[in-house]
């Protein structure tokens, strides 16, 4: 650590956003088991003209300098939809966020956190949650357990020492998110198999694949169920119509029909489960670069990602069905269909389920019943700004 003065500058233009992203990629490259992400995708997430988050939120990016060198970065953001949520659900009036936290040492980290806190206070915020980059639906939490293996698609991966730096700056953990590892080469326990067989005999239930030829329709169904199913969850903010369209367009290329299910009861969609092959497999191979030859490997992977791991990032059941035997039965039926397809069609051997909130008793029970094991933990921290 050096005693040289740290200066922190606000990012105000396209060039600054590029520096912000490139600095993050530089920090990530030094973390064991990291996987390089596509620069173009990272740039889009912080571009107010591209990411629909900015239709209801605002953010300020900061870069720290010392001795003429960039030594850290952070974002501070305020989401109007989050401010409108009940306080008992995590956000609520006066709650801002920080994210995209990277620092060369604790001195830089403390200065960046103070800068983000100051900006949030200027916006009238009285409390900060983080790290959340840029929103809960994008990359929430700091990796605090599971540093010894590579992350899957759309999951953060941070050096272990960030935990001490954030906690040392006065932050306390408010919520833990789990991911679960599942060996999909093995059949599910007999109890699950009996539940699935019973569901298949129920003529009211239909488990169907997402139809990419009607993708806009099915993406709308999925995200409308999601908005209802998760509306009482901690950290929830609703998807806007613009975000539904944006997410649908972004996800379509990695949607493989046998891996994504919609459950219907008497013809009404009531639940869904999405599964993404782990594109990090190919991103690692091409070092996160499509040019000059990365496109070839990416297109080949997209034609059929055999052997890739699988991640189940999202599932949901309408609230009218939750807390019933039917809800767990639908979940097990969808999981079973996806597991069989992942193993037989895509030659996959493992999957990850998550994130799952630590106090989401229903999802934790399902993960335990199919004998999945926690393999990663992400922490979200809070601090008062008074």
Image: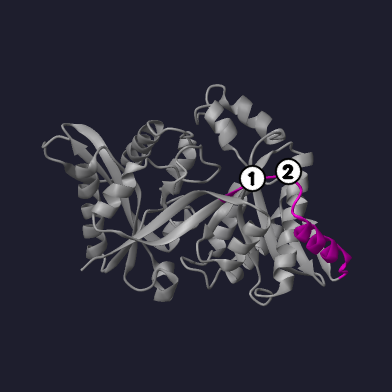
Question: Which residue lies under the disc numbered 1?
Answer: 351
* Dot 2: element: helix
Which badge, 1 or 2, comes first in the chain's sequence? 2
Q: Quadrant of the C terminus?
A: bottom left
Q: Is residue 267 left or right of residue 85?
A: right
Seen from the viewer's position, the closer of residues 381 and 316 is: 381
Asked whether 62 falls inside the magenta stretch, the response is: no
Q: Marks 2 and 1: in contact by CB < 8 Å?
A: yes
State the image coordinates of residue 232 (x, y, percent, origin top left). 53, 73
| Residue in the foreground of this view, choosing between 378 and 189 | 189
Which class describes the residues within 10 Å of circle 2: few (<14), some (14-19), or many (20+)?
A: many
Q: Nearer the viewer, residue 212 or 379?
A: 379
Q: Is residue 91 left or right of residue 200?
A: left
Q: Residue furthest front?
A: 190
Say above or below: 29 vs 134.
above
Residue 264 picture location, percent across and down? 77, 67
Image coordinates of residue 230 in percent, x first then y, are 56, 68
The residue singled out by tag 2 in the image is 342
Residue 198 colored in magenta in the image: yes
Q: Can residue 107 be seen at all in this image of the molecule?
A: yes
């Amino acid at each position: 650590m050096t005693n040289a003065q740290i200066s922190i500058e606000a990012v105000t233009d396209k060039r600054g956003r590029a520096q912000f992203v490139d600095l993050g990629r530089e920090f990530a490259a030094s973390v064991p088991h990291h996987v390089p992400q596509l620069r173009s995708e990272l740039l889009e997430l912080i571009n107010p003209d591209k990411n629909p988050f900015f239709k209801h939120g605002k953010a300020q990016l900061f870069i720290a300098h010392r001795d003429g060198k960039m030594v850290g970065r952070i974002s501070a953001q305020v989401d109007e939809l989050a401010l409108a949520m009940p306080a008992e659900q995590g956000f609520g009036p006066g709650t801002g966020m920080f994210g995209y936290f990277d620092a060369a040492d604790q001195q830089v980290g403390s200065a960046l956190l103070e800068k983000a806190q100051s900006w949030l206070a200027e916006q009238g915020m009285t409390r900060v949650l983080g790290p959340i980059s840029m929103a809960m639906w994008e990359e929430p939490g700091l990796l605090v357990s599971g540093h010894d293996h590579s992350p899957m698609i759309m999951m953060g991966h941070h050096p272990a020492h960030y935990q001490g730096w954030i906690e040392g700056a006065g932050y306390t953990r408010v919520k833990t998110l789990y991911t679960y590892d599942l060996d999909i080469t093995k059949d599910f326990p007999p109890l699950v198999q009996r539940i699935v067989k019973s569901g298949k005999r129920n003529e009211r239930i239909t488990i169907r694949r997402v139809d990419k030829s009607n993708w806009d329709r099915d993406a709308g169904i999925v995200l409308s169920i999601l908005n209802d199913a998760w509306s009482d969850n901690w950290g929830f903010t609703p998807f806007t119509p613009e975000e539904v369209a944006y997410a649908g367009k972004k996800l379509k290329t990695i949607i493989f029909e046998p891996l994504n299910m919609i459950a219907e009861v008497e013809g009404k969609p009531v639940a869904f489960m999405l599964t993404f092959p782990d594109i990090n497999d190919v991103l690692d191979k091409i070092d996160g670069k499509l040019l000059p030859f990365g496109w070839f490997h990416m297109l080949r992977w997209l034609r059929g990602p055999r052997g890739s791991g699988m991640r189940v990032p999202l599932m949901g059941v309408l609230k009218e069905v939750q807390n019933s035997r039917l809800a767990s039965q639908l979940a097990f039926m969808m999981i079973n269909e996806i597991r069989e397809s992942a193993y037989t069609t895509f030659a996959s051997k493992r999957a990850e389920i998550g994130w799952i909130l630590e106090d989401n008793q229903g999802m934790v029970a399902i993960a335990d019943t199919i004998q999945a094991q926690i393999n990663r933990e992400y922490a979200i921290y809070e601090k008062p700004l008074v």
